[in-house]
Image (cartoon, grey):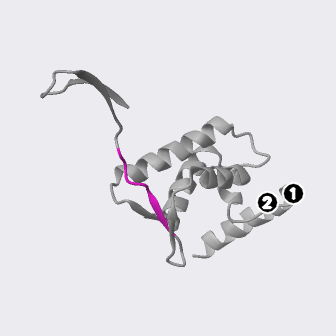
Amino acid sequence: RIRRRRECLHCSKRFTTYEIVETTPLMVVKKDGSIEPFNREKLLNGLLRACEKRPVSLKALEQIVDQIEQKLKNALEGEASSRRIGELALEQLRQVDQVAYVSVYREFQDIDSFLQELKKMQQEQLSH
């Protein structure tokens, strides 16, 4: 908010006005075509689930959400697809914790199932 002291041109009486910058809300276009307002908490909760049982601080996840929101607002489009938001989240998550990044695609019950999946991914890479 910006506070301004003003003076009436007719009676010379002084008064205060408060100005607030209006921003257009950021909207999310979902896969089914529906549109809803961007929800920071929803994104943060998704990241928390991805990093469950991982040594990633809440502060780091909040910074990821801040960075994603800022990128979307800087694009000045007013709308972003849920897919784009997911891609931005994965980019950031990969830098913070690669295991959490991989686990977004699959839930692993133990280290053996995780290693099996990594070996499978490695074999697929070698066959291509």
Viewer-closest of 102 and 22: 22
In the displayed structure, 54 sits above or below 35; it is above
Residue 4 seen anywhere in this rendered image of the structure: no
Report whether 12 appears left or right of 101: left
Residue picked out by circle 2: 114
Residue 35, horizontal then vertical, whole percent: 49, 70
Where is residue 23 drawn, in percent x and y?
37, 48
Q: Give the residue number, with chain letter if any, for mark 1.
A: 110
Q: Residue visible at 61% across and 69% down? A: 125
Element carrying mark 2: helix
Task: Locate the N terminus and report the quarter of the image it occupies.
Answer: top left
Query: Could you tell me residue 63's position as x and y percent?
Result: 55, 39
User: Is 13 located above or below residue 105 in the figure?
Assistant: above
Q: Would residue 76 appear left or right of 122 to someone viewing this image?
A: left
**Label 2 near label 1: C-beta < 8 Å?**
yes
How many numbered markers are drawn?
Answer: 2
- Nearer to me, 25 or 90: 25
Q: Is the magenta region chiefly helix, strand or loop?
A: loop
Judge the density around disc 1: few (<14), some (14-19), many (≥20) Cα neighbours within 10 Å.
few
Q: Secondary structure at mark 1?
A: loop
Identify the image quadrant of the C terminus. bottom right
Q: Nearer the viewer, residue 4 or 128?
A: 4
Residue 71, image x, y percentages: 41, 49
The quadrant where residue 112 appears? bottom right
What is the magenta range? 22-29
Q: Is residue 22 left or right of residue 27?
A: left
Please name the residue shown 66% across and 55% down the image. Answer: 46
Q: Residue at x 59, y 51 (%)?
A: 94
Tell me the amino acid under the disc marked 2.
Phe
Q: What's under tag 1, amino acid-wise?
A: Asp
Which quarter of the picture shows residue 124? bottom right
- Residue found at x 68% / y 68%: 121
